[in-house]
Image: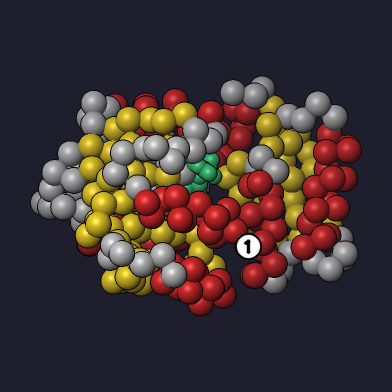
Amino acid sequence: MPPRWLELTVAIRDEVERSFAAEALVDAGARGVEEIPEGLRTYFPEPPDPEPFVSLLRASLAALRGGEEPAVSWRWQLHEDWETLWRQGLGPRRVGTRIVVQPSWTEYTARAGDVVLTIDPGIAFGTAEHATTRLALELLESRVEPGQTVADVGTGTGILAIAAVRLGARRAVGFDTDPYAWAVTRENASRNGVGHRVDVVEGPMPEGSPEFDGLVANIEWVRLRPLVPTLARRVRVGGWMVLSGVLQEQRDEARHTLGDLALEAVMEVAEEEWWAVALVAAGD
Ligand SMILES: C[S@@+](CC[C@H](N)C(=O)[O-])C[C@H]1O[C@@H](n2cnc3c(N)ncnc32)[C@H](O)[C@@H]1O
């Protein structure tokens, strides 16, 4: 873990502009982008030289808003303080009908039929605090069938891969390009007693990867769109895909792109400004 973090606050009130800014910050290496009343707050591992780093971020945020620079401020945050603050805000959360996501340091008494996922986010993305994760979990609950193999592209904390196995999949493979995600996913899989059924691939999903019965990906649409043709080829005919990370205003474009790939939408869900879809691979 880095000993200290660069905490960045960006003043943006418009919801859509916020989403684009959050994507740009994640692209630049931000962890845990949080919405606050005045805009966004996020953390970066300590850069070698903070002032030019922040100037560059300011310029890329301005480029998203036709050149208008948002107010950006920064300060150092010690790792210990960051972790304590982050943990205080999280609690057990029910998603869909059966799934309960429980941060590892909280208590939860399960009801009959609950599928409890115990997740420690570390500095990877993926608790049930973000609507895109909740939407993906909700769709997974309706798609996973016993004995299936499932790919989770952009696994983060491993939450969706672990959920797939806990919902009955025989095996799940989590792919991620972020080294922080690899260890966190392995730890979370063991914590949930499914370490032997969740594999981690350290990198993107390769073209030559085997076919899966189902595939889930929660990655912001601008990054996901170019990957979709490759991902779709890794799903067997009749298998399913769950895609999340699409803004409601990108929905029509997403529907169009997916329709061209012989993927038939079978369920759509939305929450806050986000939209997600379950599809079936129809074949040629
Ligand atoms: C929005 S997070 C989703 C995390 C988790 N699956 C969830 O639903 O909460 C997206 C993750 O995708 C990873 N990612 C981005 N582009 C990727 C790619 N081309 N291949 C694999 N992982 C990628 C990021 O590192 C990040 O961990």
- Residue at x 48%, y 74% (from the top left corner): 256
- Residue at x 49%, y 59% (from the top left corner): 245
In what quadrant of the picture does the N terminus appear?
Answer: top right
Please indicate, yes or no, whether residue 139 appears anywhere in the rendered image: no
Q: Toward the viewer: 207 or 27?
A: 207
Q: Residue 176: where, in percent of width, then height?
A: 48, 37
Please tell me whether mark 1 sits on a helix, a strand or a loop: helix
Q: Is residue 268 left or right of residue 181?
A: left
Q: Residue 79: where, in percent of width, then height?
A: 63, 28
Q: Toward the viewer: 282 or 138?
A: 282
Q: Is residue 52 left or right of residue 277?
A: right
**Residue 66 lies in what quarter of the image?**
bottom right
Q: Toward the viewer: 194 or 130?
A: 194
By what rule are the colours in the image chosen?
Answer: secondary structure
Q: Identity of the amino acid at label 1? A: Ser
Label 1 CB less than 8 angstroms from ligand 1: no
Q: Residues within 10 Å of mark 1 (few under 14, many from 20)?
A: some
Which residue, given by chain and number where applicable, does mark 1 sit on?
Answer: 19
Please indicate, yes or no, whether residue 259 appears anywhere in the rendered image: yes
- Residue at x 23%, y 43% (from the top left corner): 149
